[in-house]
Amino acid sequence: MLPGATAAVAGEAAWLTGPLLFLPMAALAWLCAALVRGEQGGLSAALQTAFGRGLGRAVSLLYMIWAVFLITVEGRLYAERLLEAGYRSAPPVVFTAILLGILLWVGRKKLGAFARAAEICCLALGLVLALVLLFSILDVSPSYVLPVWLSDLPAAALATLRPAAALSCGAYAAALAGRVERREGDRRRGAAWLLAGCAVLGLLQFGILGQLGPGLSSRMDVPFFEVARGVGVQGAFQRVEAVVMAAWIFSDFALLGLLLFAVREMAGEAFGPKWERRAVPWAVVLAFLGALLLFPDDLSAKDAAAGILLWGNAALGFLVPGLALLCKNVKRKRRG
């Protein structure tokens, strides 16, 4: 999505959406933290406290269904990226099956093991991003991204809504709150990581827009990989875009693993401990069947990712938790 969709709205100021993302993402983090505060479990427990046991279970089931849909869409898009990287003769179902098979294996292990693996994936992907960012910044045409005036801020703020909606699936991290040990300084560390992530998104967009320009970037499906094709040093290494695309599996692994563990925790809290283990294979099987039946081609998956996925993420990331927090506070005041 970045920076193609944002460049279509904000033009050369699209790279400002990175820093501007800090505000809605900080609001999302505060909303989720406030909702699960004082609960013995995570998101599902908080929803049952806010809406009552029956309605809270129903809303938890809605979150689980949407998480499976997200796994379906992202798994299909992952397979398409590998096809674009050079495996055009292979059927996408093979790559989707491999990824979901790894998720099935990981999802039946402990959360701590997944968290440590995700940290390693973050480091590896960070090195790849740093490589692309370095070469893109060195080849920037300043006229494509500068100057930026105050009058450009409204368009940049409007363009921020799409990536904010996409990233609001991070609300699923609240489902794991019951498994996380809280420590002093967590809020400060969380804010620092969030600020760093938004800065990276801004720098990546700055480099991509500076190379391709806002017009060309807005017409490309994945401008980032187009810039990655130019990464290399004559006589040393060249044509590393396939490596960059393959390394993107680290991002898919972390995101889909988070969603799968969220389904596992919410199923256990809503329907009993026996469903905690059962939910993992069911979610993976349904995601695999969904990738086969719902998205027979890459265009259908991309349309879903740019349309219904954004609306659903925004509703379950901001609207439902906000309503639940309001109900929870009203109940607390009545008891008081």
Image: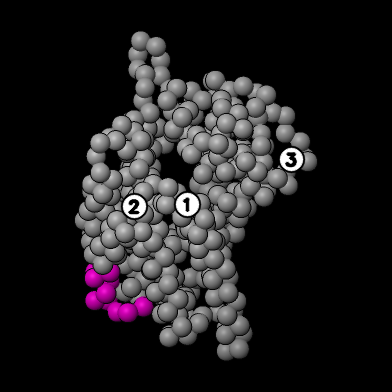
**Numbered disc in front, either 3 or 1:** 1
Which percent across, then down, holds residue 37? 50, 71
Q: Which residue is mark 1?
A: 303
Residue 264 lies in quadrant: bottom left
Along the viewing direction, whichever of 177 and 155 lies nearer the viewer: 155
Q: Which residue is mark 2?
A: 296
Tell me what residue is drawn at x 52 percent, y 55 percent. 307
Which percent across, then down, holds residue 105? 21, 56
Q: What kind of element bears circle 1?
A: helix
Alpha carbon separation for disc pair 1 and 2: 12 Å
Q: Is residue 124 found left or right of 310 in the rendered image?
A: left
**For the magenta stretch, what is the residue range?**
270-279
Residue 41 lies in quadrant: bottom left
Q: Is residue 176 visible?
A: no
First in sequence, mark 3 or 2: give its number.
Answer: 3
Which percent across, then down, holds residue 92? 28, 45
Residue type for callout 3: Asp
Q: Kindly identify which numbered label has been placed on residue 254.
A: none
Q: Which residue is mark 3?
A: 152
Which percent across, then down, holds residue 16? 64, 40
Q: Is residue 169 visible?
A: yes
First in sequence, mark 1 or 2: give its number.
Answer: 2
Relative height, residue 289 to residue 125 (above, below) = below
In magenta segment, residue 318:
no
Tell me what residue is drawn at x 51 percent, y 25 percent. 136
Residue type for callout 1: Asp
In magenta segment, residue 276:
yes
Residue type for callout 2: Pro
Q: Residues within 10 Å of mark 1 (few under 14, many from 20)?
A: few
